[in-house]
Structures are given as C-alpha cells and as structure tokens.
Amino acid sequence: LPYEQTIGNSYFRRDARESFRNEVKMMNQPIIGAVEELETNDSALPESVSDEMLIYRVISNYLRHKLKSKHQLEWNPEWKGVREHKPTAMKDYEEKKAKLAREAFLAIRSRTDQDFVEYFASTLCSVPQGMSEHRFISLTKALANNTDRIRTLSMLALAAQTPNPQQATSRTLNQ
C-alpha cells in the first residue's frame, strides 16, 4: 500500500495503537502509565508475553533511545493529555519521532526475509533493550520462525507509536 494509506494515515496509526492496547488488556496489564514501565523494566512484564508485546517494546525502546541520542529529546510527563497549544519542545519531539518511525517503517517495508532479520538485529536492536534471557530467546525464535509476522508486527508497532504532529483534520477544516 502507498505510504499515505499506512503510517502516513492517522486512522491507520490509531487502529494499530488500539490493536496493541487490546493485546496489553488481554494480558491483564494496565494500559496508561504502565506502558512506559513495560518498555524499560523487564521485570514489569509477566513471565509469558506475546510476540506483539515484545515487538512493541523493541520498537518503543528504539524510538526513545534514538530520539535521546540523535536529537537529545525525551518525553516530558507534563505533556500527557496536551492536545491543543502544544509547547514547542513537544512539537519538536513529535516531529522527530514521527520522522524516525517513518524512516524505520519504510526501511522495514522494503526488506523481506533475511534482509529484514539483519535490519531488525542491526538497527532496531542497536539500542539497549533490557530484555531477560528468556524473552530474548523467545524473540529470536519468533524472528527466525515467523519472519513475515514479526516484520508485520514491527511495521504496526511503528505506526502505533507514530505521533501526529500535524493535525491534518484541523488543517482541512480551516481551509
């Protein structure tokens, strides 16, 4: 599909985000507030986690660490819930995060089989993941045995975590 119908579409990104939230609910984990802890604290995860949760976490860690190392940007908890009149720092954070996610999404979309595995290992896993040995083995097996599924989940996780720095709907309404 064209970029505009996938990660470039706010409805697609929302649907991907909801899909991952539903996965978290099925694991009986709290949604809001716990996601950041799940991203950084391996012991916060239940013993048995799904591939979806592992991939979402890998993608989230990648985006967070790249934003910090490349742009010196970190999420500010005070921004939570801000929809209108976003601070300049928040806009910059969202724009840079959207750009990183878009680049990774397009890179994954253009790779299949072993090329994707190499990209996943060398790029997405190039930042600390803080993953237990058990989860690492689970992820490795899934990557080797279900490469296409992990590739799809990776693209969905990137879409789910892509902010919408430019509200296209409000621009359209104002025109």
Image (cartoon, rainbow, N blue to C red):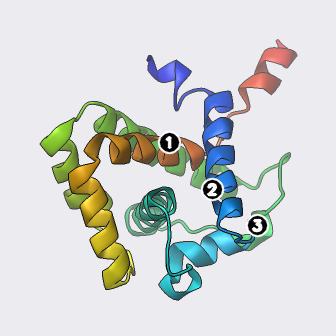
Q: Residue at x 58, y 75 (%)?
A: 38
Crowding around mark 2 (Cα neighbors within 10 Å: few <14, some 14 to 19, many 20+) is some
Q: How far across and down, in percent of the image, does residue 50 sit?
A: 49, 62
Q: Is residue 92 above or below residue 16?
A: below
Q: Residue at x 46, y 68 (%)?
A: 68
Q: Which residue is mark 1?
A: 156
Task: Specify whether residue 128 is in view.
Answer: no
The residues tagged by marks 3 and 2 sit, at their Cα atoms, a distance apart of 13 Å
Considering the numbered disc 3 on the image, is that residue within a helix, a strand or a loop? Answer: loop
Q: How far across and down, in percent of the image, does residue 28 sit?
A: 71, 70
Amino acid type indicated by mark 3:
Ile
- Camera-nearest residue between 2 and 163: 2
Amino acid type indicated by mark 2:
Glu
Circle number at residue 23: 2
- Camera-nearest residue between 107 and 86: 107
Label 2 vs label 1, nearer the camera: 2
Quadrant containing the C terminus is: top right
Circle number at residue 32: 3
